[in-house]
Amino acid sequence: MKKINPLYKNRISLKVGPHDKKNSPVSVIFQKAAEHPQPGEPGKEVGDLFIERNVDKTVSVIISLGSKTKNGSDSYRKAGGSLGRWLVKNNVREANLNLAKSAPQDDLEMLVPLCEGVLLGAYQFLGYKSDLTPQPTLDFYISSNRHADMIEKIINKTEILISSVNLARDWAHEPGNSINPVTLAERVQTMAHQLNLKCIILDETALQTMGAGAIVAVGKGSKTPSRLIIVEYPGHNPQPDAKPVILIGKALTMDTGGYSIKDRDNIQGMKYDKCGGMIVVASIHAAALLKIKTPVVGIIPAAENMISDDAYRPDDIIKSLSGKTIEIVSTDAEGRLVLADALTYAQRCYEPRSIIDMATLTGGVVTALGRLRAGLMSNNHELTRQIVEAGEKTKELVWELPLDDDYFQQIKGDDADIKNSGGKEAHPIIGGTFLKQFVDEKIPWAHIDIAGVADTPKETHYSPKGATGYGVRLMINYLENL
Ligand SMILES: [Zn+2]
């Protein structure tokens, strides 16, 4: 069978070593921090680098894993991230990690986050730089006295997983004058074709005919109308009666707020309002290449929220695909509208095992949880448990918020069935409560509000400023454990 390459090529290529030292003068050592670090010893903070130039002209890079007592798997990911960034910035062509001389030594479980960190930290978005010189791939050799086959397995999987995360980052960084609902649909179609997956694109006429009035309304002010993008991954040797997990991702390729327009400061960075959709694209990409057993359907409602004489307005009453009528309080609460139609579509066209939607939905979730955890709301305890667990394992963390039925009173419609905004109180929960009205309570469903974690205003250990790619590792871990 033809080998399918990932759509995104990582800057660093992981390889099983050892490699000839003459050609690879950089050796890498990971160490836990000393109590009082001396020159030649790793610094106290995780990710601190110490560079040692040896007499034979080789260079040793010592990376701190941080405090001895606080050494979780994310320390390895963070330390790896620092190294990945350093290797790329210094244009190192080859580097060696000998596990016998370095942590994690025989703890191959820790090699996974370490490799993830290296590939995540090496990511840069350079596509629009005019002075760009060709960027060579860097080879990172990992050697050990034993376990070569295990190391190879880890490398292969990590390369696919992180190339998927980096794909999500890359597309998220693309601005609205490059990715709009129409061009996004074309890109997903190309990806689906390369991966031999079925892809359905519903254009504005199809959506209108079908009665998907919410997603159509949101995109009406734009020259590039809304699209509903569906990709089906059938699963690798699934059980004959296996039901698909449905992943839904909000993709507002640009969100001006519409007539409830955002101010000058808040409109910046709104290209990242498509990050939910990018997680879904990337998760399908990873699931297919990693041959995950469970069937997965990705649904991406894509729209551009703009102003024109066609645009939808506050006070408008629109009819969603479910038949429920929605009174528009704020045209900037548009994410829940496109998601409502996507949720209905998912339940009409498939028999879901579970539905998980991800969206940069509310500023309120950033106020509540900051940039460390996403807000999780669900109608099902088991699904909540599975996602929380996947979050702890991948360090793509979530925190559960309540969804009591009585919250609905805040968005009960005056002239229609439901309002799309309920004022200032309990913002993220009201977002979840709105979506809950469009889900059959018998279907396990979760909503993850990623507004605080989808992008970062400053560089972190393993993400540059901008899109983090949060959610892909979380979703793949969830799928793998089903
Ligand atoms: Zn908005």
Image: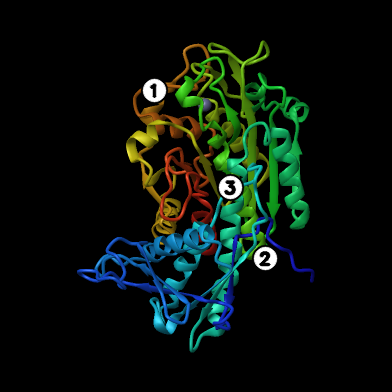
Residue with the mark numbered 1: 409
Image marks 2 and 1: residues in contact by CB distance under 8 Å = no
Residue 200 position, x and y percent, is 75, 43
Tell me if I can see residue 139 in this picture. yes
Disc 1 residue lies near ligand 1 with CB under 8 A: no
Q: Secondary structure at mark 1?
A: helix
Looking at the image, is mark 3 or mark 2 earlier in the sequence?
A: 3
Residue with the mark numbered 2: 236
- 400 vs 236, left or right, is left
What is the quadrant of residue 241 in the picture?
bottom right
Residue 1 position, x and y percent, is 79, 71
* The furthest residue to the bottom: 145
- 334 vs 366, left or right, is right
Q: Secondary structure at mark 3?
A: loop
The answer to which of 183 and 58 lies nearer the viewer is 58
Disc 3 residue lies near ligand 1 with CB under 8 A: no
Q: Secondary structure at mark 2?
A: loop
Q: Residues within 10 Å of mark 2 (few under 14, many from 20)?
A: some
Looking at the image, is mark 1 or mark 3 earlier in the sequence?
A: 3
Q: Amino acid at mark 1?
A: Gln
In the depicted structure, whether residue 256 falls above or below residue 444: above
Image marks 1 and 3: residues in contact by CB distance under 8 Å = no
Cα separation between marks 3 and 2: 32 Å
What is the quadrant of residue 340 in the picture?
top right
